[in-house]
Image (spheres, grey):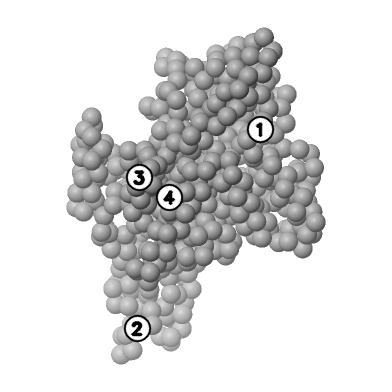
Amino acid sequence: MVPTWRLRAAFARRLSEMYGTEVPAYTTLLEVTGQINDEAVARDPDAGRLGGIDRVTAERHGAIRVGTPGELRQAAQIFAALGMRPVGFYDLRDGPGAVPVVSTAFRPTGTEELDRNPFRVFTSLLTTADRRFFDAGLEARLDAFLARRQLFPPELLTLAERAEERAGLPEEQAERFLTLAVAALELSPEPVDRAWYAELERISAVAADIGGVAATHINHLTPRVLDIDALYRRMGERGITMIDRIQGPPRWDGPDVLLRQTSFRALAEPRAFREPDGSVTGGALRVRFGEVEARGIALTRAGRAHYDALMAETDRQTAERPDTVRQETARALWEHRFPRTEHRLAAGQLAYFTFRPGTGRPADGRRPPADLAGLLAQGWLTAHPIVYEDFLPRSAAGIFRSNLTGDGTRAADRTGTPFDADRLAAAIGRPVLDPFALYADPHDRSLRQALTTLRADDA
Ligand code: OOG
Ligand code: NI
């Protein structure tokens, strides 16, 4: 029997091999990422503090985009076979560079499962009923087009159901499942209807990528790097031009929090087109890209609100200024206003940790203080950071946008269809989990246990 986590690890590995053959720049990215990670670990023995080097080396996230709730349900079934559940709700339909999708991330949720392999897939659903993007006529034609296609073969879905039920698959079925699952995310050789694709592209390149073709594909696959600033420079030296910024928190001397990401546009890939007269011609589409990320500590709701406020303040101070100014401003703001140590993040309940009774706790008969700050300061407890496993809506929007051919068109005078996590859950047919609750669970549990131990010692 191949257990769930081995299916997930094997799927991530095979998808990575497949994507490397499709997008050669991805292979360069992996090489450079590997070098930087080795160097980081050699330089700093603590580099593995937010995930050991084995986890980080295997760590990837991917992105796919689907067109209908039915397709999303099927994708969810395949991810369930891999122990990946929908976490978080992202609405990318507002603001500059908005795209007509709502998204969630499929990922493992338990600490142990994450350690075994944290593979995650950012998954977006086209919102065909959103009148800011599609009028009623186009919605009907899109829905009809999408209803005719089948992204996942029935055999794959049957195997996925079995794998979910039994928490794994026998060797031979596992092999078949993995082959079919990877194949479902390969770029399809099916000719693209040129007129239809172009019509959707005028509205949104993302709409065309989803609803203009008969299949889905992995849109990017992202390795994790321990020093994203070094990686950014070295990719430039290798002749690959990254987008003009690293998204997320600035580089600074304090703790790494949340997520920093950057990307580059992949080359145009050859695709076949069906012309209006029915003939098939050669052409190219440039829809896929490369991305890399560095992960930091997960923030609590209060920590996240603080982070969002600092980002908004950076925006206010640097509107219309070049990106270098933005980075300097962000760093200066952080130096002033963001907690400079993990200790302060923990004491201020701004980030998530697991707690253990401290080894150097006072042995002179003193009683432990009642507050977390005191417990940490006096060495009664030690706090080990919990890594952020999710995404940032703003970076996601930036990643979408930086790789689009144009901004598309939108009817600004219309309102969009309401969408939230509950509606997305109904579309998927499975609950969409709250990321904060997932981080709070090991945080709260370990704190309770550590306090119980301290009290027992005290008695
Ligand atoms: C997904 C973009 C979001 C990220 O890392 O924030 C994303 C997409 O392009 O389909 O992958
Ligand atoms: Ni991504």
Residue located beneath label 3 in the image:
236
Quadrant (top left, top right, bottom left, bottom right) of the N terminus: bottom right
Residue kind at label 2, given as amino acid type: Gly
Disc 4: residue Cβ within 8 A of ligand 1's nearest atom:
yes
**Picture coordinates of residue 200 (x, y %)?**
55, 19
Residue located beneath label 4 in the image:
293
The earlier-in-sequence mark between 1 and 3 is 1
Disc 3: residue Cβ within 8 A of ligand 2's nearest atom:
no
The earlier-in-sequence mark between 4 and 1 is 1
Residue kind at label 3, given as amino acid type: Gly
The CA distance from mark 2 to mark 4 is 36 Å
Residue located beneath label 2 in the image:
360
Residue kind at label 1, given as amino acid type: Ser
Is residue 390 shown above or below 45?
above
Kind of element beneath mark 2: loop
* Numbered badge on residue 188: 1
Tell us which disc is closer to us: 1 or 3: 3
Number of residues whose C-alpha sits closer than 10 Å to that of mark 3, classed few (under 14), some (14–19) or many (20 or more): few
Number of residues whose C-alpha sits closer than 10 Å to that of mark 4, classed few (under 14), some (14–19) or many (20 or more): many
**Picture coordinates of residue 109 (x, y %)?**
57, 56
Kind of element beneath mark 4: strand
Q: Could you tell whether 152 is left or right of 437 in the image?
A: right
Tell me whether the residue at label 1 lies in contact with that at label 3, contact meaning CB atoms closer than 8 angstroms.
no
